[in-house]
Image (cartoon, rainbow, N blue to C red):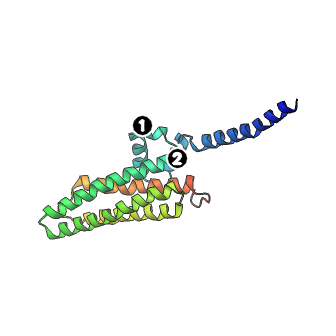
Amino acid sequence: MIAYVKSNFLLVPIVVLLLFVVSSYAKFSTKVTTSEIRGICTHRNVNASFCYEFMKSSPQIATLDISDLAKFLINYDFQKTLDLMKHFQSLTNSTTDRSSKESYKICSELFSLGIHLLESSLKALATNDYDTLDRNVSDMSAYAEECGSELSSVIKPIPQLLKGVSIVENVGHIVLVILECFLVKEKTFC
């Protein structure tokens, strides 16, 4: 009888531990819901039409939890920023108009800085360093906005570039809302 109690006594902590681990895992792996997407896309700091369209554009988004959605968006912005930086560098080298060349050069430099910010943002997200994440994504969005202003002075603006810069800025705003409304403990604007 004593052996039976001893062997079952050890099972209780194991069962409790398993329940804790499973419930914790379930809590952190829940998929982003349509109401959460609605909350993100209707936030005052987000371009709602862009947000809804973007969220529908990839079926993968529906399979992600909120943290993975932020990671997905940062990775998306990183790739878009890298592509735009290369395009701006190419235009800087090939454009003969001095004013346009200078604008492309400024955008190339801003997006080069942005690449480092987005790399750092991924690390900050992985370590739950939300202050760094907030700073980096905010700065990247500001760089995109500044580049957009620069491009308005170009003699023959390229719509594809303007759209790409706008996408980088808008995706950054979505990440900031996810950070503020879902990831940080103290919600100030949600």
What residue do we see at 43% from left, 47% from top?
A: 72
Picture coordinates of residue 86, whole percent (x, y):
24, 57
Q: Is residue 69 above or below residue 12?
A: below
Give the residue number, with chain letter if any, for mark 1: 59
What residue do we see at 25% from left, 55% from top?
A: 161
Give the image quarter of residue 53. top left
- Three-letter amino acid code of the residue under disc 1: Pro
C-alpha separation, residue under disc 1 versus residue under disc 2: 15 Å
Q: Is residue 110 above or below residue 15?
A: below
Give the image quarter of residue 152. bottom left
Crowdedness of circle 2 by 10 Å Cα count: few (<14), some, many (20+)? many
Q: Of the residues under marks 1 and 2, which one precedes in the sequence?
A: 1
- Three-letter amino acid code of the residue under disc 2: Ile
Left or right placement of residue 84 versus residue 118 in this view: left
What residue do we see at 41% from left, 40% from top?
A: 56
**Foreground residue among 28 and 10:** 10
